Image: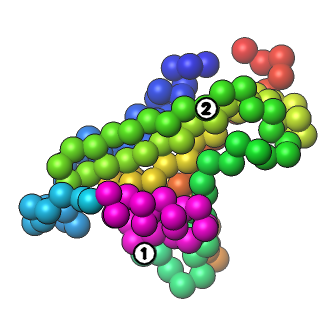
Amino acid sequence: MRWVFFLLAYMCLLGCTSPIDEVHKNSSESFTGSDILRQLDQAFYGLPNEYYPAGRPKDIKYNFFLDLEHGYCVTAGNRIHLYGDRARWAIVFEKSGYQNRSTSAQIELDYVGNCIDYPVDTFAERNYITNSSRVIQQAGVV
């Protein structure tokens, strides 16, 4: 099960290991602590940040922040993973626990950064863009 987390985290952070995109290509500036804190504040308040894909007018953008007191999750553990270089940074919040309503073990990943390839669920009417992923293990299934 642990390898699934590492695979998922790796896939989420491919943008940090791939060539620098157009936003940062011509920039010799590095990020500041204020830049990171602004992005974390936006995640805390559920506001999409400037690094989200532009999308269409009807698209819905979710920006989650780690919630250790969720009423339907018995938290087993959590971690914070930090990644960065001169121009790129990423923070991955990991929470593992038992979801008592769905009777499943889950790992929740919420990520914030200027190099994240945010997942987009595409539908005809609108897209859903988020900074969160889940790895779910149903009870009794190995």
Report the residue at 54% width, 84% height from top: 57
Tell me the chief SS of the magenta region: helix
Report the residue at 48% width, 59% height from top: 40
Where on the picture, by quarter, is residue 123? bottom right
Horizontal side of 69 relative to 17 (left or right) equals right
Give residue 118's position: percent from left, percent from top: 46, 56
* Callouts 2 and 1 close, C-beta under 8 Å: no
Where on the picture, by quarter, is residue 102? top right
Q: Which amino acid lies under the numbered mark 2 shown in the image of this protein?
A: Asn
For mark 1, does the 10 Å Cα neighbourhood hold few (<14), some (14 to 19), or many (20 or more) residues? Answer: few
Horizontal side of 88 relative to 52 (left or right) equals left
Q: Nearer the viewer, residue 45 or 96?
A: 45
Report the residue at 70% width, 42% height from top: 68
Is residue 98 visible from the viewing direction of this image? yes
Q: Which amino acid lies under the numbered mark 1 shown in the image of this protein?
A: Ala
For mark 2, does the 10 Å Cα neighbourhood hold few (<14), some (14 to 19), or many (20 or more) residues? Answer: some
Quadrant containing the N terminus in the rendered view: top right
Mark 1 secondary-structure assignment: loop
Residue matched to label 1: 54
Magenta range is 33-51
Quadrant containing the C terminus in the rendered view: top right
Give residue 2's position: percent from left, percent from top: 56, 19
Give residue 92's position: percent from left, percent from top: 48, 42
Residue matched to label 2: 78
Report the residue at 24% width, 59% height from top: 31
Q: Nearer the viewer, residue 141 or 93?
A: 93
Q: Nearer the viewer, residue 120 or 113?
A: 113
Horizontal side of 86 relative to 66 (left or right) equals left
As measured in the structure, the alpha-carbon distance from the residue carrying label 2 to the one carrying label 1 is 31 Å
Could you tell which of marks 2 and 1 lies nearer the N-terminus? 1
